[in-house]
Amino acid sequence: MLEPARPPLADHFTQVFRQEHRGLRDGLLELSDAFTARDLPRIRQVLHAVAAASGPHFRYEEESLYPGLTRIFGWEYVGKLLTDHDRVITAARRLVALAEQSELTPAEAVEAVRLVRSILPHVSDCDGLSIMVERFSESHIRAVLESREMAIGDGHDLFTWADRLRPRAA
């Protein structure tokens, strides 16, 4: 089977997208370790970093990447990706509530680790979307990357984006 030509920006997108997912993966794994240790200062620090990184990432996915994927996957799968984001936002809010306490019980630490682990599959599943982006036009990939740069420049964390800018409620 002949491979269709890949737009030159597709490889750049894949590299950037994968690096973002690696960062989120590593942050979530560190967060899990911090909750296991019930280390509230570390939990707060890592949770802040993950929220700061995931806000722009989710934003450009929803605003420019996912609409293009509808053409490939259809609305049903893209709807699942959006529902995954809803679930992640809800889980992240609970993690923040746990992190704001003066101390964590062992049961709360177990709950937090379970929540973090429930987020990880979306990170790995979403990373694979880059092979579909290879089928986008060069101009569409450029638009996704420009949307990414805008979202990063705006600097809204996950919660600010979800509460103020996201058209869909989690």
Image (spheres, helix red, strand yellow):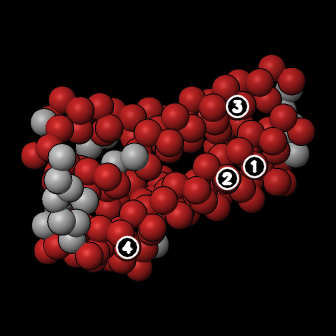
N-terminal of the pair, mark 3 or mark 1, is 1
> Which of labels 4 and 1 is toward the front?
4
Q: Give the SS element for disc 2.
A: helix
**On the picture, is 90 further left or further right than 58?**
right
In the foreground, 108 or 140: 140
> Which of labels 2 and 4 is toward the front?
4
Q: Residue at x 84, y 35 (%)?
A: 36
N-terminal of the pair, mark 2 or mark 4, is 4
Spatial separation of the CA atoms under disc 3 and disc 1: 12 Å
Q: Residue at x 29, y 31 (%)?
A: 80
The answer to the question of whether label 2 and label 4 lie on touching residues, with beta carbons closer than 8 A, is no
Considering only vertical position in the picture, is 7 above or below 162? below
Q: Residue at x 34, y 55 (%)?
A: 130
Classify 10 Å Cα crowding around label 3: few (below 14), some (14-19), many (20 and above). Answer: many
Q: Amino acid at mark 3?
A: Ala
Q: Give the SS element for disc 4.
A: helix
Q: Residue at x 17, y 73 (%)?
A: 138
Q: Give the SS element for disc 3.
A: helix
Classify 10 Å Cα crowding around label 2: few (below 14), some (14-19), many (20 and above). Answer: some
The residue wearing badge 2 is 26
> Which of labels 3 and 1 is toward the front?
1
Spatial separation of the CA atoms under disc 1 and disc 2: 6 Å
Residue 100 visible? The answer is no
Classify 10 Å Cα crowding around label 4: few (below 14), some (14-19), many (20 and above). Answer: few
Q: Amino acid at mark 4?
A: His
Coordinates of residue 76 in the picture (x, y in percent): 18, 29
